[in-house]
Amino acid sequence: MSRPSQIRALNTFGTEGVLRVGGDTAYRIHDLSRLDVPALPYSLRVVLENLLRHENGRRVTADQVRALLDWGTGPDHARSVDLSPSRVFLHDTNGVPALADLAAMRDAAAALGADPARVNPHIPAELVVDHSVIADVFGTPDAIVRNVDIEYGRNAERYRFLKWGRQALRDFDVVPPGTGIMHQVNVEYLARVVTTEEGWAFPDVCLGTDSHTTMVNGLGVLGWGIGGIEAEAVMLGESLSMLLPRVVGFRLYGELPEGATATDLVLTITEQLRAHGVVGKFVEFYGPGVGATALPDRLTIANMSPEFGSTCAYFPIDAETLRYLRFTGRPAAVVELVEAYAKRQGLWLDPEHTPAYSEYVELDLGTIVPSLAGPRRPQDRVPLTAAKRDFRKALPGILEVADDGIRTKADTRLLPRTGQPGAVPGRPRREVAVGLGSGAFTLDHGAVAIAAITSCTNTSNPSVMVAAGLLAKRAVERGLRSKPWVKTSLSPGSTVVTDYLNDAGLTPYLEKLGFHLTGYGCMTCIGASGPLIPAVSDAVREHDLAVVSVLSGNRNFDGRINPDVRMNYLASPPLVVAYALAGTMDIDLVKDPLGTDADGRPVLLRDLWPSGREVRAAIESTVDAAMFERAYATVFAGDARWRGLAAAEGETFAWDDASTYLRRPPYLDGLTPEPDSVRDIRGARVLVRLGDSVTTDHISPAGAIPPHTPAGRYLTERGVERFQLNTYASRRGNHEVMTRGTFANVRLRNQLVVGMEGGFTRDFVTGEVTTVYDAAVAYQAAGVPLVVVAGREYGTGSSRDWAAKGPALLGVKAVLAESFERIHRSNLIGMGVLPLQFLDGQSADSLGLRGTETITITGLERLNGHQVPDTVDVRADDLRFEMRVRLDTAREADYYRHGGITRYVVRNVLREAEGHPHRTR
């Protein structure tokens, strides 16, 4: 069965044309120069081409094209269009459950008499295995070898499943473990920028199951993160129904000053745009500063689009884009095509032209200063000059604050607040003696327990990686070493990084400071940091120490990095090295020495920091296109271990009921050819009542599975040893584990159980406090539906679909929140969970909704008549109010009527198999 064509246009607008490249090659295109679109933002021109190419009078209509041509002419940009990506991009921990869903869809299709092979990708789908390796071993030359051994020991079953998918599904490719981090592999190799197919040329549009898919925006590729459930739908030929967004024009001007890094820049942008408000909007960069921003710096900025909240963070194509394509070893013909296509289509950046944006923001690059962000959110930027003060200011909130001073949970001392204006505040002290090796050391609050050079956000950028290596070299030459209580690790996003660090002679210096290679994967950035040094972990747990991680990642949410670490700071790689040397956050790195050299002289950070000229010289002398060509020459082959994994064959997957990693998902159990009628939600109870900025990490943690939790007990009862419990992320193919892990984050604060942290709630059937999972099981047994009540920015952070799947399987029918993060709202709908938003000016607090009430939601039955109500009525005991229904498009309403995307898609597959041309509603 051949793949369906991506070219479906009726050519209603007469845009079909020819593009000649290099004199000999010609491609058909939909020529945007035939339309009057000079005011349209560059990113929306990509969407316009996509609509023109897929306009067929049914799914994509001429009215959708006209709506985009009229974009910005009225007060409301929010009209619905259908985007058709050219490829889907996945990683293993979202990709395994997505593949499990596809396998279950094949089972369902076969059970209803259809050919299971009809459940198959319609567009290329590429998966990179990067989320499973854990920094269990560190600080030794063989750390990577031992971590990979452990990785395969834990995950061989999952990897065999991926190999089954590769042989069973058409256009499904897998980049094996040990290659790099998905987004870095994407920008360095996989991204096409301009795609060619059947003699046509068109823009590469990439939708991924990871929220940081936006990194490819820095290369001029339009793309963003969607939930794994939505990814399954677009893989199977569904378009992505989206509202035309507002586009925020972000003007850059000036140049970065000496000593400032791309990390400092992106943390500043994240702070600025979170304050401005860009959720659900495109951000597009323009102005003279764009040309002064190196492409790796653009990638760093685009990577953190989810942290500042936008759908994407787009940089138009220009000469710097072409330079990077050559730099990473792309063939000359590809570069030539990208240039010719971008210039013909108006996708080439004109620095003198400003499109008609919805909103405008600007930033002088010359104002950027060295910075960190923390201790809990990426947008909480802290200038390095104020890092010590900010740490001391934040610490009481971490430890709990008493009205008359600062008191920690287990502290017997009460320390008065400082009263001096401008003074560095005092702080709680907790001096704990710890034996490490042959020595004894004293740890206190703020001790750096993790220093990790990690994440594609920064390891994709040679300037900050070389700067870290040069700083390490100078530190070693001055006789400094990392503190012995710091867990140090290096987990770059591609093998190219270690190649150029080796060639530059910097690896030995990083290793002398403990930054040995631990693996090529996300690792600490996603919470796969492994355990702390045992003596440090014991001290943290026994004495309630608030220790710190410093990492070059993109997220630092509560409970994400390590369950023993309460304060997490994002920083550039050279600052990560500096904090490993200092060993504490309670230091002013601008003024205080990092240590003393052999002559007893103090060594300051400025003594070690390399100049921009030194960094550029090192890059120019070591990094070349041949490195990238070698690294990706056999990108899909894998090593001997991967090639030696035996995989099942056949069109359907043989599930093993004894498996603790892979279970057939239950979402399609009892599937009927037509959906049941939508019913109102009556007699519901509140499962959890949450505050603002609840992340998908809070809802569905990704890190290590503690043995004492419901998920841990489930696994140990089935013979899984403690060391093999692995992470929640690795177990996403088993719904039994993941439902038990829902709302199980150790830092979750549920207002139904004040004073407690973790996965606990109040069961209103019994009145007892119990685990969230056990309460949900009791509610289901009693036939009681559930709701979640939350504040602003519910579902911020990762795109993980289990943050919707888990609540759905626990019996949650609706989430009542002040606002939703974009991807998570879509995921909830994809699982048949209704997102309801409080009306403007209202909240659970303002309405007096405590969470102890019985909830009834009426007005949903109007959906049976294919109407989408703007609001529904909510009754909570004697309290009555309206809430806004966040089914924003007709397609989302269809998904909800069907009980979720998977049911909708399988029903469409069945209808197509029966020869019905129209899609089910």
Image: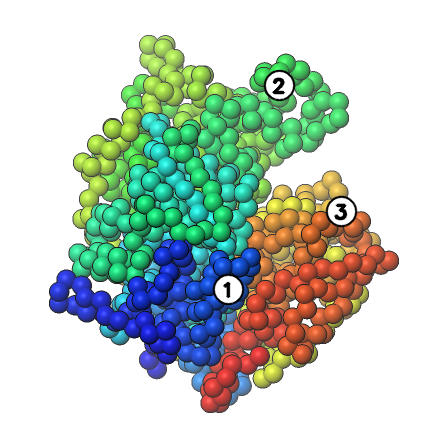
- Numbered disc 3: secondary structure: helix
> Looking at the picture, which amino acid does disc 3 mark?
Asp
Question: Residue 630 location in percent, x, y?
Answer: 20, 52
Where is the C terminus found, in terms of image quarters? bottom right
- Numbered disc 2: secondary structure: loop
How crowded pointer 2 is (Cα within 10 Å; few <14, some 14-19, many 20+) is rated as: some
Residue at horizontal 41%, vertical 49%? 284
The residue identified by callout 3 is 845
Do the CB atoms of the residues marked 2 and 1 lie less than 8 Å apart?
no
The residue identified by callout 1 is 242
> Looking at the picture, which amino acid does disc 1 mark?
Met
Question: Residue 609 location in percent, x, y?
Answer: 33, 24
The residue identified by callout 2 is 426
When asked about the image quadrant of residue 11, the answer is bottom left
Where is the N terminus found, in terms of image quarters? bottom left
When asked about the image quadrant of residue 835, the answer is bottom right
Question: Residue 441 location in percent, x, y?
Answer: 51, 21
> Looking at the picture, which amino acid does disc 2 mark?
Gly
How far apart are the alpha carbons under marks 3 and 1?
32 Å
Do the CB atoms of the residues marked 3 and 1 lie less than 8 Å apart?
no
The colour scheme used to paint the residues is: rainbow
Name which of mark 2 and mark 1 comes first in the sequence.
1
